[in-house]
Image (cartoon, helix red, strand yellow):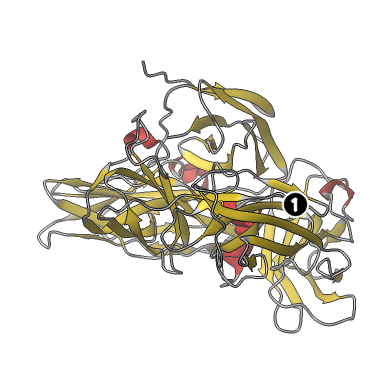
Amino acid sequence: MKSRFMIFFAAVGILCLVGSMAVAQPFSSTTQGVQLKFVSQPLATGEVGVAYAYTAHAVSSDSTDTVRYYIGNPLYEIAAAQNVTLNDSTGVLSWIPTKKGYFDITLLARSSKGGRASQSFIVTVTAGAGILQGTIVDSLNQPIPHVFVEAIQTADSTPSLMICYNYSTMTDSNGAYSFSRVDPGNYILSAISPTLQYQSQWYNGVTDPSKATILHVENAVTTTANFILHSKNNLANRITVAGSITDTLSKALKGVDVYFVPSGFVLNGSDSIDNYRKIFESHGCDFRLAGSAAQVAHAKTDSSGAYSIKLVPGSYIAFAKAAGYVLQYYNGQTDFLSATVLALNADTSGINFTLTALPPVVLGTISGVVYDSSKGTGIPSRVIAFRDRWILKDKYAVARSYTIDSDSLGAFTFSQLLPGTYYLLALPLGDYAPAYYTTDTESTVWKKATGIAINGTAISELAIYVHPILKSCDGLSRIAGKVSGNSDVSGAMVYAFSGSSVSGFAVADKSGRYEINGLAAGSYTVAANKI
């Protein structure tokens, strides 16, 4: 029996995961083979009292098609107050903003042949003339480039949960940053290190936003806030983690690659001081789980199957990979959503892996691209292929899920897939909501996903569409709780929806607990889903 449910809560709650929950936002549709897609890029900024104009353009797969444009939710809600107009034939959107803030905009395109498409984006409207600037250096006074800096406005002179306006940028090669046209008000600042080398912080030198120093910004006045980020990656602070790797016959395996990666880096986490989503979006770092980023720690096993690795204390997801064997996450998992998160704060041994050899059958491949559904551009992502999850008895008795990193343009390839039917889930990096592969739309619900049959075959050119997390304002509020169910709920995706748009998400841990961070104060619909 399928169950559908919706739970409303503002701070803490429990979700019971027994069926499916459907909340999706379409990007396009096809009628009798006609496809419609937006190809124009919206203007993301505006000023109070200054005319804003954007020409939306959607292309149809049928050259004889006629396309019309419409204002969609939630723009119509502010249309009267903001003097918004949209020419339905030319796609020209015009308005003169009358107030500052973030405005979520959705445009719809409909073709005469039945195709439909939508494009959602945010326009940031400013009105101030303040300047907020500074430099970020290490303890030796050396500049630190690529630090992500965010200024978040508070409601009053005390750090508050009612956060309603923010600015973000990145330091240059000299460690300098600057915000112009800042609205007058009180702000707290954060500096997020792009690597594990430095300790991220709120201004000035704290890791808790409630203890951050308040900065007051006025019009036509320059306010300076400098940071010193201290190293946390020295040998004195590091711990040793060790273990061994064998096969299912207890044979020691030599030369196996072992990786330990911070859980936030793996899961695209958004903790207030280690916001990896901001890091992934702010610069072109190596995001691969087995890549060269400073966050990725790597070791190889010796002839006895043993390994040892030095780590900065913290929370990690570990995995082992070797040719001819199924990639395995600790503890006995084959995808990173269900992997055990290791809290490593002291020397630790016994982190062992048992690898299973791939059976001697013809393996298949699946390849495709993860796209931003509103822009049509490729998005770097982690992709999971789930195989035959509903079959209780599996004749292969090996991995039911497989993971891969896409390239920087969103392209991915699974190359060692056993026969079966697969469902694909993309975890895009940055401020995007995870989504399943479907043939006609995007979905956060696996029961709406399209199955892909593999039997030594090669399937290519699949497109997984994901949607940006649209936020009318950032915040420091959070929703936390627990997912429970009649089977293992670790790895369940928990989404916070504002209307039909995803405002945030989190992954449930082994105990089912989750925490969605970075939300503005308000009301949300919360839904949990796991294949």
In the picture, measured across the screen, residue 402 lies left or right of residue 103, that is: left
> Is 460 above or below relative to 84?
below
Residue 276: percent from left, percent from top = 64, 58
Badge 1 amino acid:
Ser
Judging by the rendered image, the residue that carries numbered circle 1 is 349
Q: Nearer the viewer, residue 492 or 504?
A: 492
Give residue 109's position: percent from left, percent from top.
28, 51
The x and y percentages for residue 282 are 61, 67
Using the image, determine if residue 398 lies above or below residue 216: above
| Quadrant into which the N terminus falls | top left
For the point 44% across and 58% down, the residue is 404
| Location of residue 37 (image quadrant) | bottom left
Q: Quadrant of the C terminus?
A: top left
Taking the spot 39% from the left edge, 61% from the top edge, the residue there is 375
Q: Is residue 126 visible?
A: no
Residue 99 rendering spot, x and y as whole percentages? 61, 52
Nearest to the observer: residue 434 or residue 29? 434
Task: Return the residue nearer the eye: 102 or 355.
Answer: 355
Asked if one can make out residue 385 in the rendered structure from this viewpoint, the answer is: yes
Most foreground residue, 358 or 365: 358
User: Please, is residue 420 above or below residue 529 in the view?
Assistant: below
Per the image, label 1 sits on a secondary structure element best described as loop
Category of crowding for the residue at label 1, using alpha-carbon neighbours closer than 10 angstroms: few (below 14), some (14–19), many (at least 20):
few
Question: Residue sitting at 83 percent across and 76 percent down?
Answer: 137
- Residue lying at 71% horizontally and 83% vertically, measured from the top left: 173
